[in-house]
Image: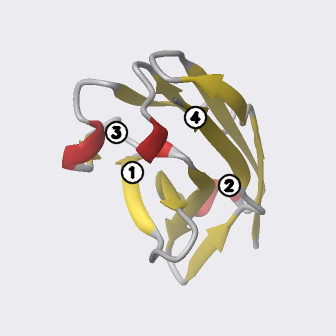
Amino acid sequence: QVQLVESGGGLVQAGGSLRLSCAASGFIFSITTMGWYRQAPGKQRELVARVTFTHNTNYADSVKGRFTISRDNAKNTVYLQMNSLKPEDTAVYYCNADGSGFDSWGQGTQVTVSS
């Protein structure tokens, strides 16, 4: 099992920045891809960004150029730097880790962007 703990959410004005962190523990050696997803009220959970063990990344079109995902394998932590935030980025952000035979989720952290 892999446990994930997120931090760094909060309230920010449009145009501002936030940095989310997600620390993994447990069977961390089995993790391949880590990522961030988000779910806004009344909407489905969607991929924001993800990064492989070898640091290959992909992003949702809506966040390209504004968000940056990174991963510190030594610290078993994944980060999401969010710049130029927009009100439509408001959501609960969830950390995800997957590997051989598992798919783990964090508890979520609220990000609210005011206009």
Q: Is residue 78 visible?
A: no
- Labels 1, 2: front one: 1
According to the picture, the residue beneath numbered tag 3 turns out to be: 54
Sequence order check, earlier mark of 3 and 2? 2
Sequence order check, earlier mark of 1 and 4? 1
According to the picture, the residue beneath numbered tag 1 turns out to be: 48
- Residue 28, numbered circle: 2
According to the picture, the residue beneath numbered tag 4 turns out to be: 113
- Labels 2, 4: front one: 4
Task: Decide: few, some or many residues near mark 4? Use Cα within 10 Å; few <14, some 14-19, many ≥20.
Answer: many
Task: Decide: few, some or many residues near mark 1? Use Cα within 10 Å; few <14, some 14-19, many ≥20.
Answer: many
Secondary structure type for disc 1: strand
User: How many angstroms separate mark 2 from mark 4 (CA)?
Assistant: 32 Å
Sequence order check, earlier mark of 1 and 3? 1
Quadrant of the image for the N terminus?
Answer: bottom right
Secondary structure type for disc 4: strand
Q: Report the side of 89 relative to 78 (left or right).
A: left
User: Residue 20, percent across and down?
Assistant: 64, 33
Q: What residue is at 37 percent from the left and 47 percent from the top?
A: 49
